[in-house]
Amino acid sequence: MSASAGTGFVLKVGDPVAAIDTPALVIDLDAMERNLAAMAAFARTHGVRLRPHAKMHKCAAIARLQSAAGAVGVCVQKTSEAEALAAAGIDDIYISNEVVDRAKLARVAALARRVRLAIAVDSQEGVERLAEAIGAARATIDVFVEIDVGHGRCGAPATAAGLLAQHVASHAPPEGGLRFAGLQAYHGAAQHLRGAAEREAASRHAASLGSAARASVTAAGIACPLVTGAGTGTFAFDTASGVWGELQAGSYLFMDRDYADNAPGPNTPRFEHALFVKSQVMSRGTSHAVVDAGHKSHAIDSGLPRVWQRELAFANGGDEHGILRPLSGGSAAELPQLGETVWLVPGHCDPTVNLHERYVALRGGLAAGVVEAVWPIEARGCVG
Amino acid sequence: MSASAGTGFVLKVGDPVAAIDTPALVIDLDAMERNLAAMAAFARTHGVRLRPHAKMHKCAAIARLQSAAGAVGVCVQKTSEAEALAAAGIDDIYISNEVVDRAKLARVAALARRVRLAIAVDSQEGVERLAEAIGAARATIDVFVEIDVGHGRCGAPATAAGLLAQHVASHAPPEGGLRFAGLQAYHGAAQHLRGAAEREAASRHAASLGSAARASVTAAGIACPLVTGAGTGTFAFDTASGVWGELQAGSYLFMDRDYADNAPGPNTPRFEHALFVKSQVMSRGTSHAVVDAGHKSHAIDSGLPRVWQRELAFANGGDEHGILRPLSGGSAAELPQLGETVWLVPGHCDPTVNLHERYVALRGGLAAGVVEAVWPIEARGCVG
């Protein structure tokens, strides 16, 4: 398999770290497997379902590892992500997002005939459009009513949940194809509040809205089978509330710099960094070094990467370059030499993964590991 | 050709705007061709060569249009970009960046046997490694010595240019494969200074260092055939200095929001926005609307996109969402309806292009145009 888009360079299983062309997206498999097991154990112990968000890893091989560890399926955000993962064999997918475009809904309906599919809605018009497409394809689909639990993005008000659930139920089998499956309640902004107490407060607020929405649904005479949501920053608080029955956390598997910057909460496993960008020094000044990884290799929406286990500060050098300087108080002797490898911990996993064609999965650590697998990132670039 | 990664949805030449799945990267061809012609005319009028930076568009079809309009070839930043464009038929490529990795240099050398290739160096060790690889492949390559003209990233000090040119010349044909071709002098940070006077001052500083470096080369007894560099923000100032003989501007062709935010300089063509992200409203609240384009569809390293010809402010909604609100003082009546199309002007072209598989090239304007072509973005994702 090609190790870099546009090249004929070939990386083989068993190759040493040194053979990995830079920049490259590298998984520390040992760390990832510990994260995988820790989250699976949490869900098992607390009696909640785990449906990890594949918008994070975008990769069928990793989704299969999660399923093998007990996950009930995956979430995605986009129709094209669902199509890409379904094409790679994943057969239980929840598009935890709204789709209202009629051409795209026809694709959703076609996919619903091939795999177990779920989707979110947050408006009456959205329900009608979905019902029309699903009906035309004679498909069935699980439908979650999304409520806004504090993020202020998509989602209906909690008080509108009952009415929307009724709209969904009015298109139930056998006449229609929509199965009301419960509530989507995800507070994205809460995940990255730095203090554990702040996250707990945001989770409590979301839980109260989730409870209110559930009451609105049952008051409308409809059973609410599940509340799904929660992310890596709040899942322990969310679970403790008893409101959520399914966790959608994704980033726990790789842990980016941004999540690691959160103050840890109680009763939460300690996840390790498992995703890295391998970079190389390509230019060396007297007071700085330049690596070959810029923001075309790692997303910077949630801040810059951290240099792994070196006393170096990373500065943005544009699309293709990163600039390294000694941490304040350090000397230029800390600077790496021309050609030297430098490992970066990305600021945000999901959009970083989206920049790469594949993962290089390394066994035995970054320093002396060997390539155990190269995994295609099937849903990379699936924006639509 | 598929209009969205992971889907079977097909977009055909002649299709109307409405057929373009969202989010999509769309070129207004009429605007792009005016930009293309304006820059070509500038270079012709001022007697400088134009070698546009293909790190901006990453696309062989566009490189061919530039060549047809008089460009001498393209620049790229990465070995894999050069390989991808060469594979698509582009045969005069300058990697305006350093490569020091030996495996990658072997690829550079292999490519130098197939196309006219140039590369930059900024260290003696870099010259030696390059010479070794080029020699082993019995290839020849044009070599530019990069000097730091104010950006503080790659590049040797101007005073070191003569010595480095001598190192390059010591590996000249017929014994070696390195042809000293001149100086690389690009001041990236200067391009985005907002005031024209600030950019002029930065260009003047860069020109003085370029002159000094050229003097250093000639004092070393070596002819300096060319100084190459300049970007969309400073090229008119750079050209007026008489130091640069070749312009590398790339963004002029598409004009992003960030470049449009610059105060225009004198004697500079007025370039138009020609690159857009087509998005669609997927959720609608009472005080905001949500479109299906987040920073997985447009890069935000240089700030958020601007909403095109609507009185709407764009707020970051994460990877997959954009949040629209009325501009301050506007009313909620400005908000678009569910399903409505909204056009975005990306903050920064280059990394935005990197997020997409293809361009949809539209003739006749955004409102009522038709699809004239769908161009693959061959060098998308070429990080290595």
Image (cartoon, coloured by chain):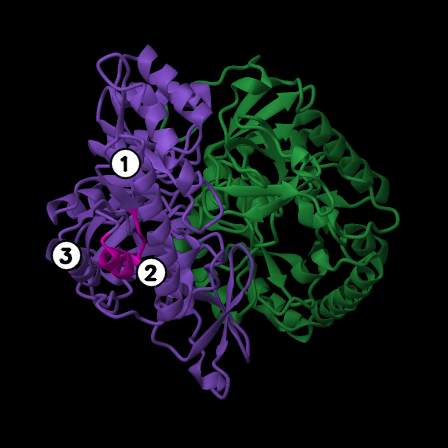
Chain colours: A purple, B green
The residue singled out by tag 3 in the image is A46
Q: Position of residue A266 (x, y in %)?
A: 25, 70
Q: Nearer the viewer, mark 2 or mark 1?
A: 1
State left or right for residue A190 relative to residue A60: right
User: Which residue, given by chain and number where applicable, does mark 2 sit on?
Assistant: A233
Residue most toward the right? Answer: B266
Measured in 3D between alpha carbons, the distance from the residue under mark 2 to the one under mark 3, in whole angstroms, is: 17 Å
- Foreground label between 3 and 1: 1
Q: Observer-nearest residue: A121 or B160?
A: A121
| 2 and 1 marks in contact (CB < 8 Å) | no
Tell me the chain of label 3: A
Magenta segment range?
A: A229-242
Q: Name the amino acid, label 2.
A: Gly
User: Residue A102: x percent and y percent?
Assistant: 45, 19
| Label 1 element class | helix
Q: Which residue is mark 1?
A: A218
Which residue is more in the foreground, B102 or A299? A299
User: Label 3 to label 1, Cα distance in Å?
Assistant: 25 Å
Marks 3 and 1: same chain?
yes
Residue B236 image point, x, y percent: 81, 50
Q: Chain of mark 1?
A: A
In which quadrant will I find the N terminus of chain A?
Answer: top left
Residue at 78% over, 46% down = B48
Task: Tell us which disc is closer to us: 2 or 3.
Answer: 3
Can residue A95 be seen at all in this image of the molecule? no
Say what amino acid the circle numbered 3 marks. His
Q: Which label's residue is closer to the chain start, 3 or 1? A: 3
Q: Position of residue B347 (x, y in %)?
A: 62, 47
Q: Amino acid at mark 1?
A: Thr
Cα separation, mark 2 vs mark 1, equals 29 Å
- Pointer 3 local density, CA inside 10 Å: few below 14, some 14–19, many at least 20: few
Determine crowd level at label 1: few under 14, some 14-19, many 20+ residues with C-alpha closer than 10 A. some
